Image: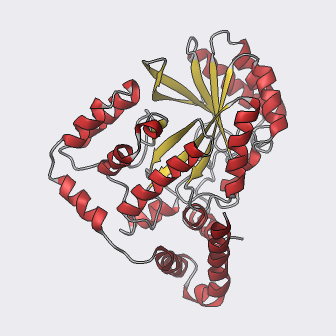
Amino acid sequence: MKFLSMIMRELRKGAFNPPQTNPWPPAIYYLPRNYGGEPYDMPLIGLETRGCSWFLSGGCTMCNFGGQGSYVSPYFLIAQASFGLKVCRGRPYLQIAPMGSFFDPNEVPLVARNNILSLVRNSGYVKSFETEARVDHVREEDIKISMEILNDIELAIGVGLESSNSIVRELIVNKGTRQELYLNFFELSKKIGFLSNAHVLLKPAFLTEREAVEDAISSIRWVIDNGGTYAILMTSNLRKFTLNYWLWERGLYKLPMLWSLLEVLRRLDSSYRKRVVLAGFLSNETLLKTAENCSKCTNYIMSKIKMFQYTRDENFLKEAWDHECDCKEEWRRRMEEDKGDLLDRIIFGYKYISEQILGKRWWEENRKWVEKEVEEVINTGRSN
């Protein structure tokens, strides 16, 4: 088992027993978007499933989508989708997504998936249907069948990339995916005609503010350059039972400042910027803590960012960036921080985490295989 998967399982022992979420009614969130040049609140109907399969084996370090942790009847999943579609009646663009992956048969059985797609097709009002999946669950045959069921309804599929840098993606986020799978995903989207998007995470653990900005910029460019329809810039937030939360409690992790989000958007060429959708703090979902500036300017900056998301009018970004506030100096100081070599920080972080959670003796006995795991990821990254 991977080191971070082992740590995540330790952090989550008993955390989702009983489940932390209610199976009924399904949660419905509204995401600020812009379709056809008009502001639009896109409904996201969240299916309460057994949970993300990757989560059950450890999962990503910032995520806590544990779901029910046990079998959920496919017919109950269908009922959730049916309820959500009735609540969202008349909304031409909508998303239905499980805790993890719509195309994982262990989470959303085939009978549930096909019936949910049929409900969407027969709704009479949906023009574009969006869902999410782990990239290793996206198979051509499944997508073709889904498109046949949807008929002339547009299909969009989002996958979690988090970072195009394999060191960040595997040794910090613990995504458990290979770079080539994303390239295959983008190629498949062009081949059979669905929209593809990839989530990019702003500020994984261990990264400085500057490194986080640079990584997000390069990852967004990588998504678009390799055929992604658009990128979703997911600004880090805090959720319990995650490594990010554990580090934050100990003063070892800071969420990004909103200035960093603006910096990413400012530094992207307009051809990239227009294909970026913002996420992580703009919906009506209740989150433990999200990216912010100081108490004086956070609401103002947030409002400008949200208006940009709704309108795609870049004047709102300029107004946000030009706003004068003392906390911008704090952000500039963070951007100048130099914490040395990232790999050294990762190893040091692993040592601290393991000693605190598993004990000093565990690290002494297992350090070599953990360092070998790090070395293998580095070598794999160099070959990509």
Can residue 299 be seen from the camera position used here? no
Please say if 249 is above or below 290: below
The percent position of residue 76, horizontal first and vertical second, equals 74, 30
The percent position of residue 45, horizontal first and vertical second, equals 59, 29
Q: 37 or 251, which is in the foreground?
A: 37
The residue lying at 74 percent from left, 25 percent from top is: 116
The percent position of residue 235, horizontal first and vertical second, equals 43, 47
The N terminus appears in which quarter of the rendering? bottom right
Tell me where residue 149 sits by quadrant.
Answer: top right
Would you say 106 lies left or right of 79 here? right
Tell me where residue 317 sits by quadrant.
Answer: top left
Tell me where residue 357 sits by quadrant.
Answer: bottom right
The residue lying at 46 percent from left, 27 percent from top is: 33
The residue lying at 56 percent from left, 50 percent from top is: 222
Q: 145 or 364, which is in the foreground?
A: 145
The percent position of residue 158, horizontal first and vertical second, equals 62, 39
Number of marks in the rendered image: 0
Q: 150 or 218, which is in the foreground?
A: 218
Please say if 32 is above or below 238: above
Would you say 305 lies left or right of 45 here? left
Please say if 350 is above or below 192: below
The C terminus appears in which quarter of the rendering? bottom right
The residue lying at 17 percent from left, 44 percent from top is: 296
Can residue 91 be seen from the camera position used here? yes
Tell me how the rendering is colored: secondary structure
